[in-house]
Image (cartoon, grey):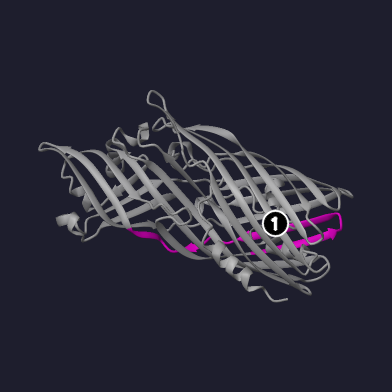
Amino acid sequence: MKIPQTLIALLLGTAGMTGTLFGTNGMNMEGYGARSTALGGAGTAIDTGTAAAVNNPATLLLMKQDARLDVALGRLGPDVSAEMPGFGSVTSSSDAFYMPAFGYSKRNGNHVWGVAVYGQGGMGTEFAASSFLGLGRDLTNMTEVSVGRFMVPYAYQVNEKLGIGGSVDYVWAGMDLCMAMSGQQLMDLANPMSQMSGKADGSLLQALDGAMPEFAYFDFANNNTFFGEAKGDGFAANVGVTYEVNPEFRFGAVYHSATSLSDLTTGAGRVTVGATSPMGYMEMGLDGDVSINDFQWPATYAVGMMYRPANRWKVVADVKQVEWSDVMDSLRLSFVANDSATNGPMAGMNLNAELYQDWSDQTVYSIGLEFAPAERGAYRIGFNHASSPIPTHYLNPLFPATVEDHFTFGGEHKVGRKSIFSWSGTVGLNNRVANEAFGVISEHKQLNFQIVYSKFWGE
């Protein structure tokens, strides 16, 4: 069977639409595909449709039909707030994101191949300029980080028990950032005797020439829902296996490599610094090139199982290790003023800033229960837990990836003989965390939904 041209057009269109996500296992989503998400994110040893490209490509072999098409739409509902005792609180206005996904897989004997586009994860917030984070200067604070994948998976049935699979992934990432920093914070970055939260240097700081900084504002953002202003791309790969002990018991394992992304860059950045000197208050606003240096997605490995205790019941569980410590030690930002007339003699001046992150590796536990009372449907519940990887003394309200516990639910229902409608919901429980160094308290909870329409060919 040939792939219809309309499916190719849909695939390419979806690749351009996978935008900002709000992950809750760090920056990872709690699950990929409606079945996995409803089962607490477990998907290493069960059929999760074309989401297998993310969960474990070897599970594509569990597809019973000749071919499958999945079209998905998710609604992500983060509820994030920040509070400074004595200065009030503010709730992020970034509270709803609608995300498409797409996948197609085809069986040929012991071989299954496919293509898929899924959002990997991310994070983001937007706080009103009038809040305490605006430093009394009407400065909006916002960030959006998104990572998406175009995946080409392949799987091979070695024998009746063992299946292997892998995927080569094209990965793209984007970032928007509007961040106000107080003079005290900027001095902390610039003073080698301090540097509690990071460090900074460059000729732009030297131009202050002893003046007392009042604030700094980093600004590179666009109004595009699906692509951040600073962009980069690269590749990654994964490999997985399944082993069926018997029809009631199956194991799975998968390894995802770390990404190899280019720096995220834009020529539409702006840095503004205000300072007071003996000559009075001065303010420099410079346009230029921004680079987020060596931003990568971490390596991940997982093991999982499926157990069928009775005819219509399944118990699934995964344990996943996410290697955040290898890629999230710092957020590194470089700025170089361009030669535009508005920059005048400050063209070419630079600022390098490094904000410490020091994320810990994260162990994610997923467990789920599925009940299929009839051939035409199934119902699922699950639980997902992963401790926040962010040290509290480096927690930034713009990057509050702190949710730890999730309750999940969902189901599927046949639509005719060759189609299935499936859905899932996730309740990310509220987590309130204080940065003891600066006194800002961040809260994060989340309510997500996903619907998937699946079309099959063959028996």
Q: Quadrant of residue 180?
A: top left
In the rendered image, residue 309 lying in the magenta stretch gets the answer: no
Residue at image position (65%, 63%) is: 103
Point out the stretch of residues depicted in magenta.
239-267
| Secondary element at tag 1 | strand
Q: Quadrant of residue 187?
A: top left
Horizontal side of residue 185 vs 236, given as left or right? left
Image quadrant where one finds the C terminus: bottom right
- Where 293 falls versus 447 (above or below)? below
**Residue 310 visible within the image:** yes
**Residue 328 visible within the image:** no
Residue at image position (36%, 43%) is: 179
Residue at the far left: name it. Answer: 279
The answer to which of 346 and 449 lies nearer the viewer is 449
Residue at the far top: name it. Answer: 86
Image quadrant where one finds the N terminus: bottom right
Q: Which residue is mark 1?
A: 453
